Image (cartoon, coloured by chain):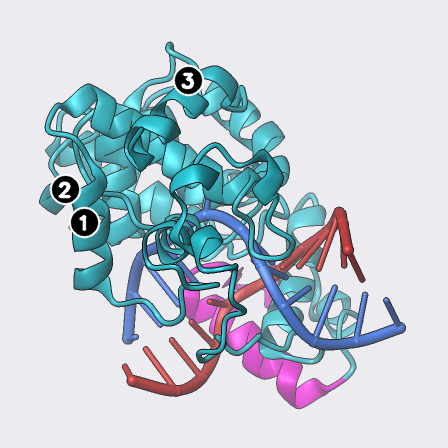
Chain colours: A cyan, B red, C blue
Amino acid sequence: MSLPALVLDWYRASARDLPWRRPETTPWGVMVSEFMLQQTPVARVEPVWTAWMDRWPVPSALAAAPRADVLRAWGKLGYPRRALRLHEAAAEIARAHGDVVPSDVNALEALPGIGSYTARAIAAFGYGRRCPVVDTNVRRVVARAVHGRGDAGPARTTADLADVDALLPGDDASAAVISAGLMELGAVVCIARGPRCSACPVRSVCAWQAAGRPEYSGPRKPVQAFAGTDRQVRGRLLDVLRDAPGPVERAALDAAWSDAAQRDRCLHSLLVDGLAEQHDDGRFALPA
DNA sequence: AACTCGTGGCG
DNA sequence: TCGCCAAGAGT
């Protein structure tokens, strides 16, 4: 059997039962899940997604909510600008698309927070369309199973898309399932560290396996530092604002980080990003 | 094209 | 312990 056929059968038989994969999930639900899953593990997203969909089941519902509510509901998923972009995208869908998530990749990519991956994921998983989806999992699976390399290396957008496109059959339904299957395979079997090849459904056709699983030798993507960075400081500051029932004095933020210069710079950047605001009395809060 | 943007779990 | 990693996007 071919690689796509093996992936298809395996996915149908043993895909994880994730809430956003259930048949009753709307394209909006898929869109919300894709925003939350950007750079964020499934286990952390699940409970937040469920609460989010109960509260804001359609784009216009989210659009009507204050940003402070949106940021609190986002919780500690990380990269809170995603929450603001989702909020903005929802407003645009309500305003310009009749409260219906677009199914067209170009229309999707025009929305804030939606890039090449997310647009294609919504088209494929939300609408069942044949649309190559390339994320870090898929790139790793293709690098190994198709090209026989231990890992993917730097992204090459056009070539990566063409690789995946070549794997998909012509019909929408099975192509969409295979797209989900490629991601699932990369997420639970063909993982970055310690791939579980003995449990792999495509082992018999895997080029990496056939080549003796040579170690990856190309350039590694640099791991980002975190301790002491602005990212950590912003996280600390936002944590104070999220946990407070209302506006806080500057002193409450001062306690969150000792380096005053860095703290002020980060607070300013949060204001610029629309993740915080300063009231007339000088106190700080999440944006209205 | 390189850099920034959170958070936490795991080997 | 701590480096590595997790369904990217925007600039």
Q: Secondary structure at mark 3?
A: helix
Q: Is residue A267 left or right of residue A178?
A: right
The foreground one among A251 and B10 is B10
The residue tagged 3 is: A12
Question: Please, which chain is the residue tagged with disc 1 on?
Answer: A
Question: Please, which chain is the residue tagged with disc 3 on?
Answer: A
The residue tagged 1 is: A109
Amino acid marked by disc 1: Glu
* Labels 2 and 3: the sequence-earlier one: 3
Mark 1 near mark 2, Cβ–Cβ under 8 Å? yes
Which residue sits at x=54%, y=69%? A215
Q: Secondary structure at mark 2?
A: helix
- On the rendered image, what quadrant is the N terminus of chain A found in? top left
A44 lies above or below A50: below
The percent position of residue A62, horizontal first and vertical second, equals: 38, 31
Q: Does the rendering let one see residue A65?
A: no
Mark 3 near mark 1, Cβ–Cβ under 8 Å? no
Q: Do marks 3 and 1 share a chain?
A: yes
Q: Which residues are magenta?
A: A259-284
Amino acid marked by disc 2: Val
The foreground one among A28 and A89 is A28
Q: Do marks 2 and 3 share a chain?
A: yes
The residue tagged 2 is: A105
Amino acid marked by disc 3: Arg
Q: Secondary structure at mark 1?
A: helix
The percent position of residue A266, horizontal first and vertical second, equals: 57, 76
